[in-house]
């Protein structure tokens, strides 16, 4: 009987130590997460310029998608979250506009019979491809020797279409992908942490860029990475927008 009691107590102690280890690992990950929001911007200009009295910026359609990260690591898009996130971003941009003093014009999708419709859609796609290329070559160590680390990217003369349509100086593009761990993914991460194994959770990645409509050049670009960012509600979404626009020339 005493031996059995000793074994029982040892098992209880082991379970307690194991549980404590999980809690400590989780606490440590949360502390690390608190500091895991980074931005880095590149710019070729120090201030915005206008041909008229005020700065006018065309806000291009938001390229935003929110997803659930399942226990198996698959991203499942959530249309309802994405819809709400876009509205929260627009609300935050209105506030930013008032603070910065520039006038933001909202892009209006042209009708299918508009002769400019195809060209504008192609411009949106081009920017998405160029933006991802900038992330790859400007931030992720795959430097292009011809650029010498400088922000030297352009969308070409096609942007003149936007300049003529809106009589604007610049175009602002925003792209964000935000994922959130499902309950199953959280449990899987805890189990992996108990074994000393790291498992990816939800995260926020995005970028914003400013295009000079006179030249087509991308004159400012900022990348955001966060494992605590959230676009599902208004207040944290405003924080995300503030981070995305960090360093934007005025």
Image: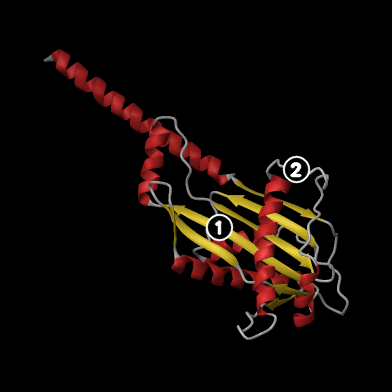
Instruction: Identify the residue at image location x=65%, y=72%.
Output: 121
Where disc 1 sits, the SS reads strand
Distance from Cα at disc 1 to Cα at disc 2: 24 Å
Q: Quadrant of residue 2?
A: top left
Q: Residue 26 versus residue 51: which sits nearer the camera? A: 51
Q: Residue 216 versus residue 92: which sits nearer the camera? A: 216
Name the spot of residue 84 as percent of width and height, x first: 50, 70
> Which residue reaches farthest right?
51
Compared to residue 59, the image places residue 134 above or below, namely above
> Can the viewer see residue 247?
no
> Which residue reaches farthest left?
1
Checking the image for residue 143, the label placed there is 2
Q: For marks 1 and 2, give the one nearer the viewer.
A: 2
Please state if 72 lies on the left or on the right of 125 as rendered: left
Checking the image for residue 229, the label placed there is none
Compared to residue 183, the image places residue 49 above or below, namely below
Q: Which residue is mark 1?
A: 177
Q: Residues within 10 Å of mark 2 (few under 14, many from 20)?
A: some
Please state if 99 lies on the left or on the right of 34 as rendered: right
Q: Quadrant of residue 162?
A: bottom right
Quadrant of the image for the N terminus?
top left
Q: Residue 103 versus residue 4: which sits nearer the camera? A: 103
Please state if 79 lies on the left or on the right of 210 as rendered: left
Q: Residues within 10 Å of mark 1 (few under 14, many from 20)?
A: some
Q: How is the image coloured?
A: secondary structure
Q: Quadrant of residue 177?
A: bottom right
> Which residue reaches farthest top?
3
Q: Residue 16 versus residue 206: which sits nearer the camera? A: 206
Name the spot of residue 153 as percent of width and height, x first: 78, 57
Compared to residue 202, the image places residue 96 above or below, namely below
């Amino acid at each position: 009987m005493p031996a059995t009691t000793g074994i029982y107590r040892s098992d209880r102690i082991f379970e307690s130590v194991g549980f404590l280890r999980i809690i400590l690992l989780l606490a440590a990950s949360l502390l690390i997460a608190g500091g895991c929001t980074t931005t880095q911007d590149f710019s070729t200009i120090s201030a915005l310029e206008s041909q008229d009295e005020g700065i006018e910026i065309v806000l291009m359609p938001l390229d935003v998608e929110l997803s659930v990260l399942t226990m198996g690591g698959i991203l499942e898009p959530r249309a309802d979250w994405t819809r709400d996130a876009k509205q929260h971003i627009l609300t935050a941009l209105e506030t930013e506009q008032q603070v910065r003093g520039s006038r933001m014009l909202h892009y209006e999708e042209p009708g299918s019979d508009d002769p400019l419709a195809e060209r504008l859609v192609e411009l949106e796609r081009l920017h998405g491809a160029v933006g991802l290329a900038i992330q790859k070559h400007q931030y992720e160590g795959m430097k292009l020797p011809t650029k010498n680390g400088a922000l030297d990217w352009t969308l070409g003369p096609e942007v003149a279409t936007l300049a003529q349509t809106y009589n604007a100086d610049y175009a602002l593009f925003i792209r964000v992908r935000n994922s959130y761990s499902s309950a199953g993914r959280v449990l899987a991460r805890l189990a992996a942490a108990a074994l000393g194994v790291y498992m990816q959770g939800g995260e926020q990645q995005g970028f914003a860029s400013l295009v000079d409509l006179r030249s087509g050049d991308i004159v400012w670009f900022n990348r955001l990475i966060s494992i605590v960012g959230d676009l599902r509600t208004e207040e944290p979404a405003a924080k995300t927008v503030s981070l995305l626009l960090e360093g934007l020339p005025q």
